[in-house]
Image (tube, rainbow, N blue to C red):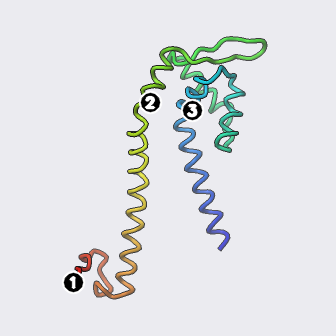
Amino acid sequence: MPSIYLRKDRVIRQICRRLVKNFMDVIILSELKERQMSGYDIICVIYEQFHLLFSSGTVYFTIYRLERDGLIRGRWSARKRVYTLTPKGENVLKEIADSHRIIQEVVARIFSKITRGEFLQRTAVVKRVTGRDGGTSLHSQPPTLS
């Protein structure tokens, strides 16, 4: 039985990793709203917040894209490049913040579809075991209340 939990933990970790990677630009913008940071600082913050370590290539690819899009600005300070949020980046971050409910609804829909599917599968198994639908069909009508 422990292998089931290991698989479940692995699946959860993979989903979290995908979410953080897909929202990395938003994470970086929100962190730069608080303070200027180097690329290394951003990698460390992501690790501290999400307990996920991404390669420097993954993080810097996102940083360079944000800089190219004019959302952040980089400048050399001592021996490292330090990034700050631009006014355009602040506006984009505000738009994202204003849209957070829509984003949450989209994510909720994705997971509700998965959990609804699990519910329907479990219901079908219960129906087969109890014989309410004759034990063969998975598409029977729901029981009526008398």
Q: Quick check: marks 1 and 2 in contact, CB under 8 Å?
A: no
Q: Secondary structure at mark 2?
A: helix
Q: Quick one: quadrant of the C terminus?
A: bottom left
Which badge, 1 or 2, is on the more N-terminal residue?
2
Q: Tell me which residue sits at (65%, 36%) in the image.
A: 46
Which badge, 3 or 1, is on the more N-terminal residue?
3
Quarter residue 104 falls in: top left
> Which residue is denoted by mark 3 in the rendering?
27
> Which residue is denoted by mark 1 in the rendering?
146
Q: Secondary structure at mark 3?
A: helix
Position above or below: 145 against 92: below
Give the image location of residue 19, x and y in percent. Answer: 53, 43
The amino acid on which the numbered mark 1 sits, given as a three-letter code, is Ser
The amino acid on which the numbered mark 2 sits, given as a three-letter code, is Ile
Could you tell me how far apart the alpha carbons at marks 3 and 2 are, in whole angstroms?
11 Å
Which badge, 3 or 2, is on the more N-terminal residue?
3
Position above or below: 70 against 28: above
Q: Tell me which residue sits at (50%, 20%) in the image.
A: 90
Left or right of 37 in this view: 18: left
Give the image location of residue 63, x and y in percent. Answer: 60, 24
Few, some or many C-alpha atoms within 10 Å of disc 3 (few <14, some 14-19, many ≥20)? some
Could you tell me how far apart the alpha carbons at marks 3 and 1 are, in whole angstroms?
54 Å
Give the image location of residue 16, x and y in percent. Answer: 57, 47
Give the image location of residue 35, x and y in percent. Answer: 64, 22
Q: Tell me which residue sits at (62%, 68%) in the image.
A: 4
> Which residue is denoted by mark 2 in the rendering?
96
Left or right of 73 in this view: 145: left
